[in-house]
């Protein structure tokens, strides 16, 4: 799976700026048998409708170019993925609606099960949504599952229902900070880092990453946060409440 911020890598000598995403895409499609990119879109909580046949990616120009390249798409209206390859239908399950993207029966769960390679091209793991999956597997107390009701449209038809995010509470200004654990995992050889162009490439395999983060959460429950939360919260009856 590829996360990217191509603007941080700099120009490709002799190439038209507008052609750069297509060049990167061609390189990666030749290199990987199965290629997946996030095509996250954050409009669903407000619009309450997502047509996956046309819904744009909001997480980088490369992912949007990829989305338009005859890809298969997963079915969560916020945390969706596009992919090409021999195992992509098995991983993304384009005809099976995904209500919760951070449970074992999800795209992230299947990527973990396959020990997928995750690459961060031009950016570090501050954008690593797989970390939220790890937090959900550990059941951190400072997040809660929040449902967003709406309609999802795709080749499978139309589905109405609740679609979940594993949220930080609105009542506190909690911020994540993955820098410390990133540096630990680099030092331990779990995350690899290479200087590339004007930035860096970070990459890791899903299983050792998850195992290390869970081990550190057991030792320091708030290692992924900038500050310790004042309270824990739940979402019930349509509102956020302090956990008793």
Image: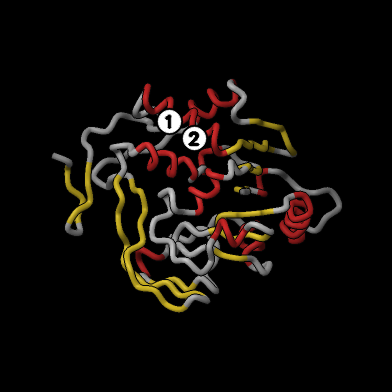
Secondary element under disc 2, as helix, strand or loop, is helix
Q: Is residue 62 left or right of residue 109?
A: right
- Residue drawn at x 70%, y 32% is 194
Q: Nearer the viewer, residue 181 or 230?
A: 181
Q: Measured along the vertical axis of the image, is residue 93 above or below residue 169?
A: below
Q: Residue furthest bottom?
A: 157
Task: Place residue 191 in its image quadrant.
Answer: top right
Return the residue nearer the eye: 83 or 198.
83
Residue at x 45% of width, y 75% of height: 153
Which residue is disc 2 drawn over? 210
Vertical placement of residue 231 versus 103, above or below: above
Q: Position of residue 33 (x, y in %)?
A: 72, 53
* Place of residue 133 in the rendered image (x, y in percent of width and height, measured from the top left): 44, 44
Residue 228: quadrant of the picture: top left
Furthest residue in direction right, as rendered: 14
Res 214 label = 1
Residue at image position (65%, 68%) is 68
User: Badge 2: few (under 14), some or many (20 or more) residues near its Cα, within 10 Å?
Assistant: many
The tally of labels here is: 2
At a point 76% along the width and 48% down the height, the residue shown is: 11
State the colouring used for the structure image: secondary structure
Tell whether label 2 touches label 1 (CB within 8 Å): yes
| Percent of width and height locating residue 227 | 33, 30
Q: Residues within 10 Å of mark 1 (few under 14, many from 20)?
A: some
Image spot of residue 169 (x, y percent): 28, 45
The residue most toward the left is 244
Residue 169 numbered mark, or none: none
Quarter containing the C terminus: top left
Position of residue 70 in the picture relative to residue 55 (left or right): right
- Mark 1, secondary structure of its residue: helix
Real-space CA distance between mark 1 and mark 2, rounded to the nearest whole angstrom: 6 Å
């Amino acid at each position: 799976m590829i996360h990217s911020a191509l603007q941080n890598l700099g120009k490709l000598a002799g190439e038209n700026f507008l052609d750069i995403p297509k060049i990167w895409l061609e390189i990666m499609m030749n290199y990987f048998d199965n290629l997946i990119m996030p095509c996250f879109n954050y409009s669903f909580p407000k619009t309450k409708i997502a047509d996956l046949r046309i819904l744009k990616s909001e997480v980088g120009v490369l992912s949007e170019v990829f989305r338009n390249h005859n890809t298969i798409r997963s079915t969560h209206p916020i945390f969706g993925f596009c992919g090409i390859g021999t195992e992509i239908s098995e991983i993304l399950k384009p005809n099976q609606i995904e209500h919760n993207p951070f449970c074992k029966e999800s795209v992230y769960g299947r990527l973990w099960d396959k020990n997928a390679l995750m690459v961060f091209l031009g950016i570090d793991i501050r954008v690593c949504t797989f970390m939220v999956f790890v937090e959900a597997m550990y059941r951190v107390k400072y997040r809660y599952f929040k449902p967003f009701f709406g309609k999802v449209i795709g080749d499978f038809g139309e589905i109405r229902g609740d679609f979940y995010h594993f949220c930080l509470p609105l009542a506190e200004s909690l911020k994540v900070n993955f820098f410390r654990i990133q540096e630990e995992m680099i030092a331990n050889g779990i995350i690899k880092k290479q200087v590339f162009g004007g930035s860096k490439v970070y990459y890791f395999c899903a299983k050792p990453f998850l195992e290390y983060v869970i081990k550190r959460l057991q030792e320091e429950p708030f290692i992924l946060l900038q500050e310790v939360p004042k309270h824990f919260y739940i979402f019930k009856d349509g509102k956020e409440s302090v956990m008793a």
